[in-house]
Image: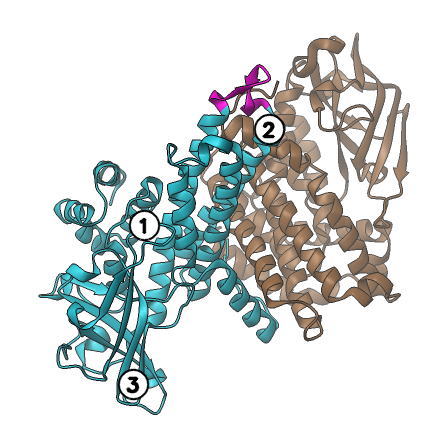
Chain colours: A cyan, B brown
Amino acid sequence: MDAEELELFAKSLEHATARHTGAALDAALAELGWGDAFAADPRAAVATLFELQGATATTSGALDVVLAVALGLDPTADGDGDLGVVLPALGASEPPGRVEGDRLVVLGLGTADLARRSGVLVVTAAAASAVGGAGGLGALVLDPADLDLRTAEGIDPRLGLITVAADLAASPASSRTRVGGIAGGTPGGTPDWEAALDAGRRALAHELVGASRTMLELARQHALERIQFGRPIAQFQAVRHKLAESLVAIEAADGALAAAWEDPSPTASAIAKAIAGRSARTVARHAQQVLAGIGFTTEHPLHLYVRRVLVLDRLLGGAGALTRELGDDLLASRSLPAMLPL
Amino acid sequence: MDLSEFRAALDRWLDDNAAGLAPTDEDRATLDAQMAHLSEVKRRAYDAGWMRWGWPERVGGLGGTNLLRAYLGEALTARNLVEPGIYSMTEVLAPTMIDYARPELAAEMVPRLLRGDETWCQGFSEPGTGSNLASLACRATRTDDGWVVNGQKVWTSLAQYAERCVLLTRTGTPESAHRGITALFVDMDTPGITVRPIETMHGLAEFSEVFFDDAAVPLDRTLGEEGQGWAVAMDLLPYERSTALWHRGAYLYRRLEQFLADVPPGAVTPAAVGEVFQQLYAFRARSRATQRRLAVGEKLGAETSIDKILLATAEQAVFDLITDGLATDVLLGDDARSARLRSEALYSRAATIYGGSSEIQRNIVARRLLDLGADR
């Protein structure tokens, strides 16, 4: 997209996320052609939409599209355009499905619209000896009716996350044998789970950055308006420095995220997601403190974002786990990955 | 020359000349030896052309963008050929000379700095003027043919080695604050200038007190116009927070890598290692974007305060990790390697203080980037 197209696209997405969330936002995204934009310019489409979703605390099924495409599906193909993708359990990065003998056990999460999808894609792991390709990974599309889907209200009911569970025969009658373009469309091919994690983590990191920027702006506005001791609290250095630290945290995440697009690698997107998650929680803490009493009420929107980032941080691997894994890798290899050349 | 061409050719030259460029333990042992070795590396790199790329032709350069300078400094520091702090002074002072000195003066002087013939220093801070730079008091009084300087500077890095100084002086009334400041380019052998090095906790007397007692400075050594010194300083600071920081990041990258090779199993947690690397990575991503903005001619400003905060935080995190993981060496070791680690770990404490403390950087972020208004 050129600069003018991008601006128009961003404007229409801004309009959509300001008015809709959930299924209504999905409908609005379909109408304004977000899927086509994503196919043409993934970075612009993902960055713009997910930052806006974060900024407005709205939600959509766009993460399913991002994951499905990374797994090799063609969302424009017949029937594949409406697939949901089961996410790993909270905090986890492993595929949500597990083939145990002749059983298929699924334990994971889904976005709000999962129950309304025509099919649900489950990536499965199995013992290396089992059928399912190298690394024991497989994928199949199930009828949502065969899964135990429950809305997980939890700390962030508006996110509408769904817990997904199932214990089925390994090849349930409802499953489709052809799974889009995965491994060239061969049944039983190996899905690229790493690529799905990569793409999903970048999208979620953008959402965390968007939410962080809104929290900072809410706190900033309050600091400028709230008068104590005869002056706006924005004049007190303790307050100013919390807000400054928040911006530093956001820009650190933003920079790592840009680098994850420019020099893509599994390490780069895991780092971006970890930094975005940690930064969002830093910003949430500072914004909460600056907004003080009003920010603790449901009369002020801050709580929506505080809730949201706690959950987003833990989708597709939380900051803590991703950071430990990175440290494990560095200590094992005793070297640093060559990265970010000028 | 573009960056990839430059990178390949420079890497080849550094490989071929590694033996002649690498410092010995003696070259690293004292600041005198480090400075002598630095001059030698700069001279060789200048004579081979590397040190001239990225600088304009009118000051003896060969043209090309700042990315070439950024990569040269990265390669020299990452290969342990120079110490980043003393190497990168060039990145702070040469751009200021190019922007503000008379063209003939810049053309005469800048090549001496690039070639390692001279060391320059930056006379900004004073005993009564640290974070509050606009309150500086070192006075320059107009005479018929120039200025007479009286007063004192402090924390002046490398002043005891310097042939020249970019000096901020008070030329307006004491109340004129940032409006009454003038920048001068001063010969350090001018009668009336006394330099006293200050011993530091990391063992290298890196900075000095500088006393001015009726030191005469010719009028044509004024940088910019009289009263324009604040603008000179404000233009200099983003340079201090861009290419010089990129070099420092490359050095920290190298230090962390060496640490991973040396650390005993179980001495540090994976979480600690992962987080330190992420901090360094976040700085590098940010600093790379800054380098690229500079390369397309963008003017840098207050946003470079974020680069400085990220670098300072990462530097202390790297050396906190090293101090934890190699505690016996850092705290008790008597060999040259341990002494060096100890010195570097101690020096990292200054990262949140020099070049504008982290508090001042946060003030800049609050006022200029978050538009929170004045703080009183």
Q: Residue furthest bottom?
A: A129
Q: Nearer the viewer, residue A57 or A10?
A: A57
Q: Nearer the viewer, residue A297 or B49?
A: A297
Query: The disc numbered 3 marks a residue on which chain?
Result: A
Q: Which three-letter amino acid code belongs to the residue tagged 1?
A: Pro
- Residue A219 vertical placement versus B221 (above, below): below
Q: Which residue is mark 2?
A: B235
Q: Which three-letter amino acid code belongs to the residue tagged 2?
A: Asp
| Range drawn in magenta | A224-235
Query: The disc numbered 2 marks a residue on which chain?
Result: B
Q: Which residue is mark 3?
A: A133
Residue B259 % position (x, y): 69, 66
Asked whether the beta carbons under mark 1 and mark 3 sit within 8 Å of each other, the answer is no
| Circles 1 and 3 on the same chain | yes
Q: Is residue B64 visible?
A: no
Q: Which residue is mark 1?
A: A157
- Residue A293 vertical placement versus A182 (above, below): above
- Judged by depth in the image, the label closer to the viewer, 3 or 2, is 3
Q: Is residue B45 left or right of residue B118?
A: left
Q: Is residue A31 visible?
A: yes
Residue B48 % position (x, y): 64, 54
Q: Is residue A164 left or right of residue B156?
A: left
Query: The disc numbered 1 marks a residue on which chain?
Result: A
Q: CA distance from mark 1 to mark 3?
A: 38 Å
Q: Residue at x 85, y 64 (%)?
A: B336
Residue A187 % position (x, y): 18, 82
